[in-house]
Every structure is written in C-alpha cells, then in structure tokens.
Amino acid sequence: MFDILVYLYETYYRPDACPEPAALARKLSAIGFDDIEISEALDWLSGLTEMACEELPDAAASTGTRYYVDEEYTELGSGAIGFIAFLESAGVLGPVQREIVIERALALDESPVTLGKLKIIVLMLLWSQGKEPDALMFDDLFGADDEQVPRLLH
C-alpha cells in the first residue's frame, strides 16, 4: 500500500490531478501494482479525504497538550509519538492535522507503526491539503528512516 502512496505523491503534483478512483485503480493495475494493495490504498486515501474535509473548529484553536491513551501509545509506539510531537513543535502539523495523522496511522494493521510509514502518512496528509513542506522538513520526511537515532526536542 505504501508503495502506491509514494507513487501517487511523486506522480501527481496535486491530489486534484489524480484520476477518479476507478480510473486510478485501472492505471495502478496496468503499472503492475497488486489489486489488494490498490484496494487498501484507495480505501486508506478515502478515509484521509473524509477526515481532511471535516470541520473541527474547536481543535484548530487548541493550545493544550495531547495525551495518548494506552491503546494509541501501544499502536503508534514511542518513536511515532515523538516524531508527531516534533512535527507539531516545528509548525509542520497543527492540532487538527496531528489528529488526522494519528487516526490514519491507527487505521493501519500494524503495531507499532514504523517511522518510515508515519513519514509517508504525514506527506500524504500535506499533499491532500495542497501543502508542501519546506526543503529541510521535506528531507526529514522523505529521507532515510533513522530508527536508531533518537529525536531530541528542544
């Protein structure tokens, strides 16, 4: 599924440049992607689109601290939670975007979510909103997956 998401990010500059889901599925199948992966990716993208379109005015103005329940902590893992906190403190993610990233990460059948996959989730969220991270943040998001190097927040 993540190979398809990266392909979409690299191929289509904007999400509105993507074909409709049925046409996109045919195109992805013709390229050689597996039908099951295509279906999973399109379902995941549909969930992303639904969440991104929802209006959450109270959360947008939030300046509080986000606490994770045990299930979220177990599913995401400390690396993903630390990276989300880093992105929020760097101004890449706002409170609403953070919640969308968390929800989309929890929608995966993976525990804990790898840092590499979380980075793709963040890129896809920004892409779906027509936002592009600055060059340094892009390198951090799309660069090597440094699982062994702890991220320090200052």
Image (cartoon, helix red, strand yellow):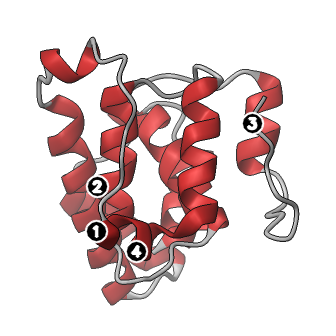
Mark number displayed over residue 107: 1
Q: Is residue 54 above or below residue 117?
A: above
Mark 2 belongs to which amino acid? Answer: Glu
In which quadrant of the rendered view does residue 108 lie?
A: bottom left
* Cα separation between marks 1 and 3: 27 Å
Q: Nearer the viewer, residue 90 or 139?
A: 90
Mark 4 belongs to which amino acid? Answer: Glu
- Which callout, 4 or 2, points at the residue further toward the start of the chain? 4
Report if the CB atoms under discs 1 and 2 are less than 8 Å apart.
yes
State the residue at coordinates (28%, 55%): 103
How many numbered dots are placed on residues in this image? Answer: 4
Left/right of residue 66 with respect to residue 107 in the rendered view: right
* Cα separation between marks 1 and 4: 10 Å
Q: Which residue is mark 2?
A: 103
Work out whether residue 6 can be spotted. Answer: no
Q: Nearer the viewer, residue 130 or 143?
A: 143
- Which callout, 3 or 2, points at the residue further toward the start of the chain? 2
Query: Secondary structure beneath disc 4?
Result: helix
* Cα separation between marks 1 and 2: 6 Å
- Which callout, 1 or 4, points at the residue further toward the start of the chain? 4
Q: Which residue is mark 4?
A: 75
State the residue at coordinates (63%, 48%): 83
- Which callout, 1 or 3, points at the residue further toward the start of the chain? 1
* Cα separation between marks 3 and 2: 23 Å
Mark number displayed over residue 95: none
Report if the CB atoms under discs 1 and 4 are less than 8 Å apart.
no
Other residues around mark 3 within 10 Å, as few (<14) / some (14–19) / many (≥20)? few
Instruction: Please name which of the two marks, 3 or 2, marks the residue nearer to the observer.
Output: 3
**Quarter of the image that includes the C terminus:** top right
Q: Which residue is mark 3?
A: 153
State the residue at coordinates (52%, 82%): 32
* Cα separation between marks 4 and 2: 11 Å
